[in-house]
């Protein structure tokens, strides 16, 4: 092969591999395995060679875990071909990956599906101490089993000596009796291009900091789309669609250092975005350029939970250039909501300005509950109340 042809071939194969999420390398690696040692000399391991069937009937827990254990020995990756793999709890190891090719859609799993096989687990995929790990291209299906079982779970007794640095990418995590992703004392991580949906807890529940949530769906969870109820800080939420969750679409309690920018927040059960006090005030946050539509679907219309944005006891927060809209369900039924646009109380050194509230609330666009310190600026928030058609 000529030198320039070899160079082109390398670039072409690299591009093809990138499109498949690395799967072409994984598939090509099968030839180096042996029957005696299916992981011999390889960094990429096909889970089928460890005996996983993926037929939706056989318990594949041991086979998948053996593949993950083998990957840990070489800091490698386990590839999962398309299929439905029944499994109980799996443990992911440091500096390893569990990957497939995503073919799931908005309402159904697809591609490599990990389906929970037992209601006695605490989670399906445990990434505790799995620092530097990657979960990509999979559909995790909780099948509604058990009680408070999470899809992906990290639970550390303390924050440890180094960053977690895990990645969750292009995954669907749905139908768990707990949270889609539950992170306790996590720091330095990313969740990208994924769908956390239809879980009985939160889409993602966080205790920790230094995370990136980019270009995800948080849809139809019974509690919040994203929730941080314990200590939390330094989070970036950008270009997510957060919708139809039973409580807040975004709930932050006593957090610090957030960028909430360019998200679409639709049909929250209570507030679209709620910053609440608790173990301390929310501080140093930017809420900018988000679209919030028909929040407060399930809230008492008399309650301030029926609002697009609630800022309670915050410090150093900018709420700028957001667009707010009243509406009802897609099919023209259901309650019109919310009653209120932006509700604020006990703020200090905060700015609420240049938000557009055209038909942004039913009863009151801006609700000032008082108790503020110095440095509050509220101005130039044009809009009008929505009148329900008769």
Image (tube, grey):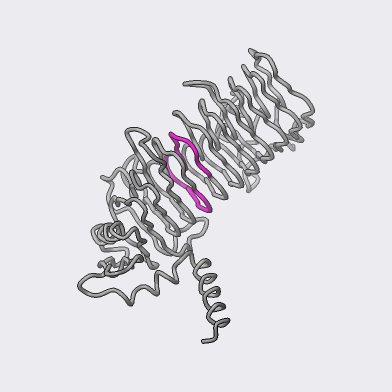
User: x%, y% of residue 265?
Assistant: 61, 41
What is the magenta segment's predominant secondary structure? strand
Q: Residue at horizontal 67%, vertical 27%?
A: 342
In this picture, is 356 found above or below 143? above
**Residue 120 shown left or right of residue 208 in the figure:** left
User: x%, y% of residue 371?
Assistant: 63, 12
In this picture, is 100 found above or below 385? below
Q: Residue at horizontal 34%, vertical 38%?
A: 155
Q: Is residue 273 magenta?
A: no
The residue range painted magenta reads 191-212
Q: Residue furthest front?
A: 3
Of residues 334 and 106, the one drawn nearer to the viewer in this rendering: 106
Query: Quadrant where the C terminus lies?
Result: top right
Question: How many marks on residues?
Answer: 0
Q: Quadrant of residue 59?
A: bottom left
Q: Residue furthest bottom?
A: 1
User: x%, y% of residue 312?
Assistant: 59, 22
**Residue 322 shown left or right of residue 17 in the figure:** right
**Residue 253 shown left or right of residue 157 in the figure:** right
């Amino acid at each position: 092969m000529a030198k320039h042809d070899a160079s082109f071939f390398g670039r072409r194969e690299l591009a093809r591999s990138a499109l498949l999420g690395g799967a072409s390398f994984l598939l090509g690696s099968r030839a180096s395995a042996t029957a005696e040692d299916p992981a011999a000399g390889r960094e990429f391991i096909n889970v089928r060679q460890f005996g996983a069937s993926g037929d939706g009937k056989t318990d594949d827990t041991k086979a998948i875990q053996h593949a993950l254990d083998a990957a840990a020995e070489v800091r490698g990756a386990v590839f999962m071909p398309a299929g439905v793999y029944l499994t109980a709890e799996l443990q992911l190891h440091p500096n390893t990956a569990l990957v497939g090719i995503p073919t799931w859609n908005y309402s159904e799993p697809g591609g490599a599906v990990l389906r929970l096989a037992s209601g006695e687990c605490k989670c399906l995929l445990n990434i505790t101490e799995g620092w530097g790990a990657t979960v990509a291209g999979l559909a995790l299906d909780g099948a509604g089993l058990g009680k408070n079982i999470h899809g992906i779970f990290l639970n550390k007794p303390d924050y440890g000596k180094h960053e977690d640095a895990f990645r969750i990418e292009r995954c669907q995590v749905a139908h768990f009796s707990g949270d889609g992703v539950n992170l306790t004392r996590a720091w330095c991580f990313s969740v990208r291009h994924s769908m956390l949906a239809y879980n009985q807890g939160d889409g993602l529940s966080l205790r920790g900091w230094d995370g990136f949530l980019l270009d995800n769906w948080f849809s139809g969870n019974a509690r919040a789309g994203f929730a941080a109820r314990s200590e939390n800080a330094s989070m970036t939420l950008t270009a997510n669609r957060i919708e139809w969750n039973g409580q807040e679409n975004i709930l932050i309690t006593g957090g610090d250092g957030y960028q909430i920018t360019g998200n679409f927040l639709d049909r929250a059960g209570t507030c679209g975005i709620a910053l609440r006090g608790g173990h301390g005030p929310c501080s140093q946050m930017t809420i900018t350029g988000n679209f919030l539509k028909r929040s407060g679907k399930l809230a008492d219309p008399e309650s301030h939970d029926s609002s697009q944005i609630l800022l309670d006891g915050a410090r150093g927060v900018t709420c700028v250039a957001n667009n707010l809209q009243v509406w009802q369900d897609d099919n023209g039924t259901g309650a019109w909501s919310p009653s209120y646009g932006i509700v604020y109380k006990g703020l200090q050194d905060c700015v609420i300005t240049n938000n557009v509230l055209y038909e942004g609330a039913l009863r009151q666009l801006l609700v000032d509950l008082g108790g503020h310190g110095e440095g509050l600026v509220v101005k130039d928030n044009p809009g009008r109340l929505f009148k329900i058609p008769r």
